[in-house]
Image (spheres, rainbow, N blue to C red):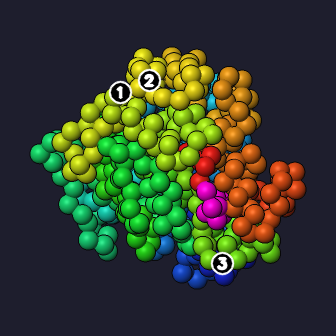
Amino acid sequence: MNVTQRYRAVSTRDARFDGVFTLAVRTTGIYCRPSCPARTPKPENVEFFDTAAAAHAHGYRACKRCLPDATPGSPQWNLRSDVAARAMRLITDGVVEREGVAGLAQQLGYTPRHLGRLLTTELGAGPLALARAHRAQVARELLVNTALPLSEVAFAAGFGSIRQFNDTMTAIYSLTPTALRSLAQRRVTKTHHTDSDWLTVDLQLPVRPPFDAAGVFAWLAARAVPGVEESGTDFYQRTLLLPGGPAWFRVEATNGGLALHAGLATLTDLMPLVARVRRLFDADADPIGIDEVLASDPQLAPAVAAVPGVRVPGAVDPHELLVRAVIGQQISVAAARTQLSRLTAATGATFEANPLGLTHLFPTCEAIADFGDQVLTGPRSRIQNLMRISGKLASGELSLSAADDPDEQRLRLLAEPGIGPWTADYVSMRVLGSPDVFPITDVALRAGAVRLGLPADAAPLAGWAETLSPWRSYAAIHLWRNAATTKGQT
């Protein structure tokens, strides 16, 4: 968007652009979300930034009226696949807090200095400033929505000290953490240590409407591995292993988005958990922009009208998703679930004393590589491929993350025997959140196309999908929903 388009969005208080960019007002020294109800400033008194960190770096403070940080993340980090977007995914996952700027740069394949120059050019702020802004946003949410002690808020948000926490929050919001909490209009939720020593947190995760939460819950329910996860019409819960240890969470749909209830081994895992849950539910998508493109096609328009705001379900663990995809090749969802259940019961670590009643963690790649062939059934070549791939993931010989370059990830996966275009496309959709993937070989996708009056043959169907770029992944979700069979999805 150019400056004129952004100012027009601000003038009409268009909430669709909240989180996409920020508006900074020179005369007041504050920055706002585009839909801020305050009087629209004159064009000559404003400037725009892609990130809150850039506004901070230019000396602006967050608006106390519209709370610009309490918005969904920018959808451009899903749409874009450049280094800046990949860096933002890692920053929101807490990589800077765990590994420093050097670790962030290493994962992206750059030197720290080069990465700093690149991010400053692209986003208006370097990696430390971007991480600092994200820590402040997380801390503000915890101050407003929980009763965690201030010291635990600082720790959970990734601050290195209480002094750093106080200084940063005061600089950004012109209020101390205590004052920020006292101004909260909502009742905070008591957060406490349970008898089993879980650190429990309740948060509200904003999502842009319309939001087909029921569709994501149904997708996850069909693939839920007993003992590890469970899903119903309006909730999803599971166990998982985070950088600091095991954890569990439950997500429920609310009018404003998603309610997250989680138990952690350490509060430093809160930031990566929130980032992964948001990716799982594709919470930062731009549903209005996506639906406008999809509804422009006459065959797809009725499906879009019937189910607005569809999301592409993501993944909380890239390695787990690849294992699921390899096991599910050329078999039904139900058959894949049976295999995964058997594998989990035999090789997954037990997970006791949690309020969700779940019993296991999903098996690690090490455990699968060691014992998977003793449990799984089916074609021997497929089992051997899974064992080899799991071993490579466990050793680091094969890497996979939510911040991969899409083209490089695809080439890396296709180089592995037993991984074809469908698996690579499916991993790209769910691990990277790639919005423009259309797995043309999928049987269920083509069955759904026929039900909507579209061609069944690959070439004309692929040609039809080209007209919906860059949102072909969302078109695929609509076709899968309309399929008579679910074979080929995992």
Q: How many marks?
A: 3
Q: CA distance from mark 2 to mark 3?
A: 44 Å
Q: Nearer the viewer, mark 2 or mark 3?
A: 2
Which residue sits at x=32%, y=43%? 227
Residue displayed at 67% across by 73% down: 304
Is residue 166 something that shows in the picture? no
Circles 1, 2 touching at the beta carbon (< 8 Å): yes
Would residue 345 be counted in the magenta stretch? no
Specify the amino acid type for callout 2. Answer: Gly
Residue wearing tag 2: 372
- State whether the magenta stretch is mostly helix, strand or loop: helix
Q: What distance separates the C-alpha of mark 1 from that of mark 2?
A: 8 Å
Write the start and end of the magenta stretch as one range: 476-485
What amino acid type should be assigned to the residue bearing mark 1?
Answer: Thr
Above or below for 164 versus 445 = above
Which secondary structure, mark 3? helix
The reply to whether the magenta stretch includes residue 478 is yes
Q: Position of residue 117 (x, y in %)?
A: 69, 35
Pointer 1: what residue?
347
- Give the mark nearest the N terminus, 1 or 3: 3
Name the side, left or right, on which 77 lies relative to 130: right
Q: Bin the neighbour count of mark 3 within 10 Å (Cα to Cα): few under 14, some 14-19, many 20 and up.
A: few
